[in-house]
Amino acid sequence: MLPRPKLPRSISLVAIILAVLFLSACSPAKVETPPTPISTPTAIPTAAATSTPIPTVIPTAVATGVGDIMRKPLVTDIYTADPSAHVFEGKLYIYPSHDLDHDTPPSQNGDQYDMEDYHVFSMDNLQSWPVDHGQVLHVSQVPWATKQMWAPDAAFKNGQYYLYFPARDKDNLFRIGVATSPSPAGPFTPQAEFIPGSFSIDPAVFVDDDGQAYIYFGGLWGGQLEKWQTGQFDPNGVEPADGKPALGPRVAKLSADMLSFDGPAKEVSIVDEKGQPVLADDHMRRFFEASWMHKYNGTYYLSYSTGDTHYLAYATSPSPTGPFTFRGYVLKPVKGWTTHHSIVEFQGKWYLFYHDDQLSGVDHKRNIKVAELTYNADGSIKTLKP
Ligand code: FUB
């Protein structure tokens, strides 16, 4: 074996450096390890934690609390729907329905919408994800109610917060109840009885600039509105015949203490551009459910779902009690049968809160979303596509 020729020390050093550089150039580029996806936080434990947390992975933006939240499911660990949004104490509060993760077969009566409690959410701004304040009211706390805690709304007056909600009473009729809290985040304490004279579903409460509060409500089919046309519940009541005026939502002034109607509820009239009532067979324009009232530039905007045609429509009036003239659509049909919303101004912009069934693909397991809403110069709303 020949002895290895010895290299001078300086040459060996240069060789080593060159070898290191060569090897590092040949090695694969260092791959950034992706951050471990953060799985959905467990739902806040509540007295009625009957829903299974939704098995999903939420984007990093959700985990960090900052991101582009527009048109994305705002809550991913429980199912939420019917979002009523209000600005209270400088924050945006959302009062949605809480859909449960069960497989009750669908019916025209709405049995699959078998909800039993409410959560409240808040947002400091519309770049961060809502905070869940947990369960604020459960059906077991409401003496008169038995089931189906459907779309709620909230209001503030007299230094107190009010949560209005529909549920079935002991006779299986939908009624509207009210619960109170010193905080917009609840929890809410229910009144022992439903609001006298109330019926049907989907209360929406609007407090006008002069302090007078109005409650709008009603919904067809599962919501039973067509069964109240005589002022009494008629189990055989049906929608008006084709060619007759459609049923409108009901409106009542609320009493100063916000706990009862100040007089009987009246039917709201929705008319076309010629002042003629929208007809019962005009399913593209007739009221079905999900009333919402907001005021923009001094005009009152009544928006609602057209039900079986799945639009969010709107009509305007110089008066909070109408008649309202049909103007067009706020939102085209979303994924899922129901559509329900609220419209609110927050930090200088207008927003539509709505829902679809993106997370589940099931009509009664919905998720709330938000999109910016804009107006044309004539006060008409620019129709949003989901
Ligand atoms: O969430 C139950 C019912 O579905 C609501 O009360 C309706 O408006 C519809 O969204």
Image (cartoon, rainbow, N blue to C red):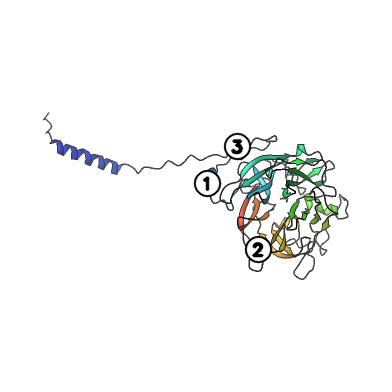
In the rendered image, is residue 151 in sight? no
In depth, the one of 302 and 359 nearer the eye is 302
Q: Quadrant of the C terminus?
A: bottom right
In depth, the one of 362 and 137 nearer the eye is 137
Q: Is mark 3 within 8 Å of ligand 1?
A: no
Pointer 1 or 2: first along the chain: 1
Name the amino acid type tagged 3.
Answer: Thr
Residue 208 location, x and y as percent? 74, 57
Residue 336 location, x and y as percent? 66, 51
Name the amino acid type tagged 2.
Answer: Ile
Crowd around label 1: few <14 · some 14–19 · many ≥20 (10 Å):
some
Residue 3: name its quadrant.
top left
**CB under 8 Å between discs 1 and 2:** no
SS of the residue under disc 1 = helix
**In screen coordinates, is 10 left or right of 81?**
left
Q: Which mark is residue 159?
A: none
Q: CA distance from mark 1 to mark 3?
A: 17 Å
Residue 33 location, x and y as percent? 42, 41
Q: Is mark 1 within 8 Å of ligand 1?
A: no
**In screen coordinates, is 37 left or right of 223?**
left
Instruction: List the residue tagged with mark 3.
Output: 42
The relative height of residue 4 versus residue 114 in the rendered view (above or below) is: above
In the rendered image, is residue 130 in sight? yes
Q: CA distance from mark 2 to mark 3?
A: 38 Å
Instruction: List the residue tagged with mark 2.
Output: 381
Residue 112 location, x and y as percent? 73, 44
**CB under 8 Å between discs 1 and 3:** no
Q: Residue at x 58, y 38 (%)?
A: 41
**In screen coordinates, is 144 left or right of 352?**
right
Instruction: List the residue tagged with mark 1.
Output: 61
Q: Residue at x 80, y 56 (%)?
A: 251
